[in-house]
Amino acid sequence: MSPRPYNLGKRQEPIDAARQQVLDAARRLLGGTASYTAFTVDAVAKDADVARATVYYQFGSKTGLLEAVCDDLAEIGGMAGLADAFTDPDPVQALHRFVACFGRFWAADRPAMRRLRALALLDPDVGAVIAARDQRRRQGLTVLVGRLAETPLAETPLAETPLAETPLATAEPDLAVRILATLTSFETFDTLAGPDQEVTAVVPDILRLAEAALGLQEPGLRGPADNRRH
């Protein structure tokens, strides 16, 4: 019997360890670098104590490294739970789950997130990666807005009172998606949280703003978002 599978498994362990070592170094640099130009493949390799060639072997390019960093942050931030938002039968509750999930994601490594978003404005490689991730978030919101538009609010468990006007998701779905994309962005969470709060602490505030903007509540008629399950 060939020992090859066993040997491959043994060889994979240091490869995986080196990969994580590089990812950890990349996050450290993103979270602590003073200069926007300091995040380079060479700098990551030096911080990870590996050869520059190792970074390229593991990730292929700077863009590949950035994609892997984003995937690592998504795993840390529990983005796997986003699927719950699209399987919840109540569209309003689905929106709650979506917002809460992104709150956890943005909180995964706030300094690194902040630097990534800032770098996206200056570095085309970073910009392309972040733009693609933001587009996925908008696509998810488009699905949720479509569900809100198709389901009369009175049929959802969270609809406690009738609305005086047509909800924005029905009247202007494209505008609704743009508003939600703004509200669920890292920049909005980060600004609302300020320096003294955790990012996840403002999830109820984001939900209140989202529901008010979409016309899912009338002031004084429904309870605050943070008193509901999400």
Image: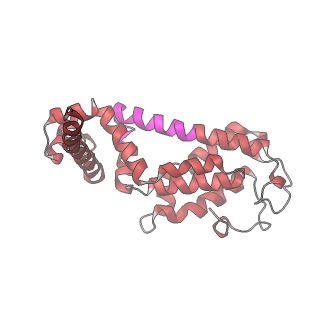
Q: In this view, does 30 lie above or below 160?
A: above
Say whether residue 205 is left or right of residue 190. right
Give the main secondary structure, helix, strand or loop, of the magenta stretch.
helix
Residue 119 part of the magenta segment = yes
**What colour scheme does the image use?**
secondary structure
Q: How many marks?
A: 0
Displayed quadrant of residue 68 = top left
Looking at the picture, how far across and down is residue 167, in whole percent?
A: 78, 48
Looking at the picture, how far across and down is residue 75, in whole percent?
A: 41, 50
Say whether residue 48 is left or right of residue 27. left
User: Which image quarter is the C terminus in?
Assistant: bottom right
Say whether residue 104 is left or right of residue 164. left
Instruction: Please tell me which residue lies in front, 5 or 171.
Output: 5
Magenta region: 118-138
Farthest residue in the front direction? 1
Q: Residue at x 66, y 64 (%)?
A: 225
Instruction: Please tell me which residue lies in front, 12 or 71.
Output: 12
Q: Is residue 158 above or below residue 179?
A: below
Instruction: Please tell me which residue lies in front, 106 or 18.
Output: 18
Looking at the picture, how far across and down is residue 222, in whole percent?
A: 77, 66
Looking at the picture, how far across and down is residue 183, in whole percent?
A: 58, 51
Displayed quadrant of residue 202 = bottom right
Q: Residue at x 66, y 70 (%)?
A: 227
Q: Which residue is drawn at 32% across and 33% down?
A: 64
Residue 167 part of the magenta segment = no
